[in-house]
Image (spheres, grey):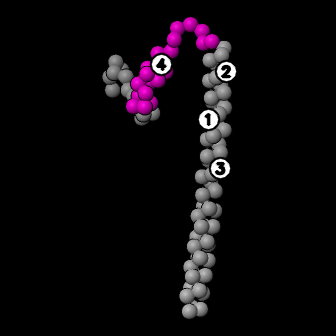
Amino acid sequence: MDPEIPWASASDLAEYTYCPRAYWYRTHPPPGEVPRGSQRRAEAGTRYHTRELRSEGARESNAGAYLVLVGIGLVLLAAVGVWVWSLR
């Protein structure tokens, strides 16, 4: 691999596809110090995304239980349908 040719990861390509300007700003940070307000907002964004990913992981870990409950509900619905049909 030629060290003069930079490579891009899949997430780099996805970010560029979503917003070329965001990719450019991430790869070319402004010179000088980052303002304290920007740091606070970035930290708040990181906390928000961490919290959201944690809750999404919790929902995904319960997907099996939801699937079992839906299956039981369908079996009960079918049983009631058969019972109602047999009353005719």
What crowding class fits label 3: few (fewer than 14 Cα within 10 Å), some (14-19), or many (20 or more)?
Answer: few
Kind of residue indicated by mark 4? Tyr
Of callouts 1 and 2, the N-terminal one? 2
- Identity of the residue drawn at 60% across and 12% down: 34
Residue 58 disc label: 3
Query: How many angstroms separate mark 1 from mark 4 (CA)?
Result: 20 Å
Label 2, on which residue?
A: 40
- Disc 4 secondary structure class: helix
- Identity of the residue drawn at 61% across and 81% down: 80
Label 4, on which residue?
A: 25
User: Of all residues shown, which one is farthest toward the front?
Assistant: 88
Which segment did they paint magenta?
15-35
- Identity of the residue drawn at 66% across and 14% down: 36
Residue 49 disc label: 1
Kind of residue indicated by mark 2? Arg
Rendered view: 18 above or below 52: above
- Disc 2 secondary structure class: helix
